[in-house]
Image (spheres, rainbow, N blue to C red):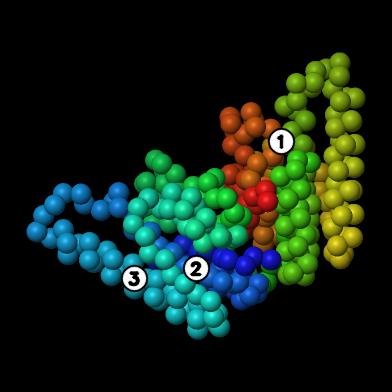
Amino acid sequence: MYKHILVTVDGSKSSDQALTKAVDLAKHYNSALLISHVIDVRSFPTMAGPHHGDLWSQYNKTAEDLLEKSKKEAETAGLKQVQTILRNGNPRFEVPDKMTKEYDIDLLIVGESGRNAAERMIIGSVTEACMRRSPCDVLTVKNETNATLYRSILVAVDGSEQAEHALATAVEMANIHQAKLTIAHVSEWGTFSKDIAFYQHSYVAEAQKESENMLKKYKQQAESQGLKDVQTILRSGNPRLEVPRVLTVENNCDLLITAETGQHAVSRFFTGSVAESAVRRSPCDVITVRKT
């Protein structure tokens, strides 16, 4: 499914979990694994001084040791195709904008968060930058569950072309992992411009029927590809809360799959996309699928 997997490490617990998941998935898919670390030059002292060279050497040595340790962990687990990458720069650009393209990556794996909480609060985490900027699928690791043990997958759909790509990924992964698949749609009926007293009843009924037909079609597609007992869920509410916080818990999911974007660009601008909310709020692993 995925042939070239890139994982970023920084020595934090979160990145350790991402590495473990990357190794497991690379074994499962027989993929090449690239392990990367970017020395964030913005945090390095810029003033020249008698100890400047020593500090830089220490930074590099620590990074090289981290990558070597990570590579040994992967090889000990049985991987044959393991490569390390050490770069200097801004990890929010080096990882999603450059490395993914240079190495033809089709899955980028990142931890939920890194080391610098204060900086994340101000300018955003590397994780969020990867989710927004990467041209390939992005897996955000939220827990330590073995990657080969995905047993309950939830995919969020809205009828858009992007969501259908997410559905295709979810079906393929459910087949590979022999997992239960749940297809969910959350309608924001209360926010529609037609939601006026005179039209409300008929419009909501029409929207609900369209959503039911969409889910029925997706269920048939999934089952035609070999899946059994595919579940569908139709809810009304705020999908940015309902999908990651409620449905993942109610269905005991260990993997949530969403599209990078959905139908409503204006709504995403003001309130954030379901994908972004999933990365922030979901208790389980999240794959953000890019259109291929």
Percent x, y of residue 206: 89, 30
> Where residue 276 appears, x then y in whole percent?
58, 44
Instruction: Look at 45% across and 76% down and name the residue there.
Output: 71
SS under mark 3: helix
Q: Residue at x 83, y 17 (%)?
A: 197
Would you name the residue on which mark 2 appears?
34
Q: Is tag 1's residue or tag 3's residue first in the polypeptide sequence?
A: 3
* Local secondary structure at mark 1: loop
**Which secondary structure lies at badge 2?**
strand
Image-quadrant location for residue 144: bottom right
Tell me what residue is drawn at x 58 percent, y 29 percent. 270
Q: Nearer the viewer, residue 237 or 268?
A: 268
Quadrant in the rendering for residue 146: bottom right
Q: Amino acid at mark 1?
A: Gln
Q: Give the mark, 1 or 2, whose residue is nearer the N terminus.
A: 2
Q: Is residue 59 above or below residue 275?
A: below
Task: Estimate the x, y position of residue 62 in percent, counting from the top left.
Answer: 30, 69
Task: Find the distance from the CA under tag 1 to the CA under tag 3.
Answer: 44 Å
Residue type at mark 2? Leu
Determine crowd level at label 2: few under 14, some 14-19, many 20+ residues with C-alpha closer than 10 A. Answer: many
Counting residues from the N terminus, which is met first, the one under dot 2 or under dot 3?
A: 2
Q: Position of residue 236 (x, y in %)?
A: 77, 37
Give residue 248's mark.
none
- Is residue 126 visible in the rendered image? The answer is no
User: In the visual, does 238 lie left or right of 90?
Assistant: right
Q: Does residue 279 appear anywhere in the picture?
A: yes
User: Gap between marks 1 and 2, in whole Å?
Assistant: 34 Å
User: Which residue is tagged 1?
Assistant: 263
- Give me the residue at 79% from left, 52% from top: 183
Taking depth in this image into account, of 153 and 235 the one nearest to the observer is 153
- Tag on residue 64? 3
